[in-house]
Amino acid sequence: MATDCDTVPIDEANIGRTLETATADPVRVAEILAKARILKGLDADDVATLMAVESPELLKEVFETAKWVKEEIYGRRLVLFAPLYVSNLCHNECLYCAFRKSNTEVKRRALNQEEIAAEVKILVEQGHKRVLLVAGESYPEEDGFNYILKAVKTIYDTKSGNGEIRRVNVNIAPLTIDEFAELKGANIGTYQLFQETYHRETYKKMHPSGRKSDYDWRISAFDRAMEVGIDDVGIGVLYGLADWRFETLAMMQHIRHLESRFGVGPHTISVPRLEPACGAPLAADPPAPMADVDFLKAVAILRLAVPYTGIIMSTRENPEVRRATFELGVSQISAGSRTNPGGYGEDEKFDTAQFQLGDHRPLDEVIRDITYLGFVPSFCTACYRLGRTGQDFMDLAKPGKIKDHCAVNALSTFREYLMDYASPATQVAGERRIAKALEEMTPERRRTAQMLLDEVKKGRRDVLV
Ligand code: SAM
Ligand code: SF4
């Protein structure tokens, strides 16, 4: 039984030794890439070796293998979501974040339930089916933590036309065991939390005060969440604070800890990189900047190391970098995002936003772009609603059976989007993409997909297998 103060052992000395001894010997790299194709993941030494790869020829092979693994497990699907910032109140002092307590350059705002519903309507009318609720670590006094529970309910209860949000993931500060139990009761999808940095000393410097200054409280959050049955958790590290190689190996240790304790690791990995933030000068001048090429390398290596864990790409990155990562292993993307509470009803405002975005394109434009690139946008939310989470999800994913569900649900939810929300140009591109995807399917899968697509055409919604 986890207690509120357990920790997760991150062996910094061991990571240091692994990194020091790692060299990109071409024979060893070839062995590791062959191992990656078995789809059973990689160990820390393998990851360190791949991170040491510098030569363009070898790097190309790493990328080719990551592309292969991505295709093999996820096909061409990309699942879409939007973040929903409900509040920027915060009692912490994270040096890189615009929401930090002492920042007077940011206007504070916590949306009330009517304002949250208004934001949800806008997202639904754009075509979104899943949102990631995001908040600073301080809730309006009158409600306390109940504010989050109410917000989740408001999101699920808000309808507009044919549409509704079908999955609410949350990215909020670590909770006590009892609070996690309440959050599970609110029927959330994934509980997402980034450790920011696994390097204790850096962590201490970056988080000088507030609840978040307790490293162990944060790193043990998933143990508490999983203990009460939240079995889809989303891990991540904020690249730019400490050496990216260290962070990646430490995150692998965290993942292996969860796997050995709960039999299943995180459902998703996020790879946020520091972006400039109003009133947080450190963000524009990262202590350990990560070059684009290393960022792509990290995504590719994570794809190989934990092949069945989804990788999420946010709109922090610009369209070019995002496109490159989609090929290398990303399976979920945000689009049309705002990081200021109330941002969907207003213009993008830097004086209430958490950080600057790299991709400002609206959802429809992103959908059209990824369709032209040969991806299939998916708004599927079937798994968690049909109970396929945690171990059950992995039991289907590992033998490749989950694809039977995902591939067809992606097409039916994409057609819903095309019929209900898309611009004429996106409709044409999308229907063409659906036809091509059908052609490439096995006859059995094509029959199921065609049946679902026909139902959607007749006007039925939310038809899932
Ligand atoms: N307040 C909660 C917390 O800190 O865990 C949850 C929400 S916080 C708004 C979401 C994430 O945004 C943080 O975990 C951090 O990784 C990321 N973030 C903060 N400042 C950022 C910046 N300047 N650039 C990119 N990401 C940033
Ligand atoms: Fe607050 Fe989260 Fe920003 Fe830190 S990262 S200041 S906890 S909102």
Image (spheres, rainbow, N blue to C red):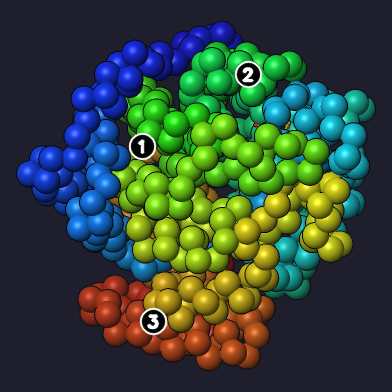
State the image quarter where residue 21 is shown.
top left
- Dot 2 crowding, Cα within 10 Å, few <14, some 14–19, many 20+: few
- Three-letter amino acid code at disc 2? Lys
1 or 2: tag closer to the N-terminus: 2
Say which residue label 3 marks: 450
Q: Quadrant of ligand 1?
A: top right
Q: Is residue 455 left or right of residue 100?
A: left
Quadrant containing the C terminus is bottom left
> Is 85 situated above or below 258?
below
Which one is nearer the viewer's eye here, 27 or 323?
27
Which one is nearer the viewer's eye here, 178 or 201?
201
Say which residue label 2 marks: 205
SS assignment at label 2 = helix
Question: Cα distance, mark 1 to mark 2?
Answer: 37 Å
- From the viewer's perspective, is the residue at label 3 or at label 2 nearer? 2
1 or 3: tag closer to the N-terminus: 1
Q: Is residue 389 visible?
A: no
- From the viewer's perspective, is the residue at label 1 or at label 2 nearer? 2
Say which residue label 1 marks: 391
Q: Is mark 2 within 8 Å of ligand 2?
A: no
Q: Are marks 3 and 2 in contact (CB under 8 Å)?
A: no
State the image quarter where residue 134 is shown.
top right
Residue 171 image offset from top left, x and y in percent: 63, 38
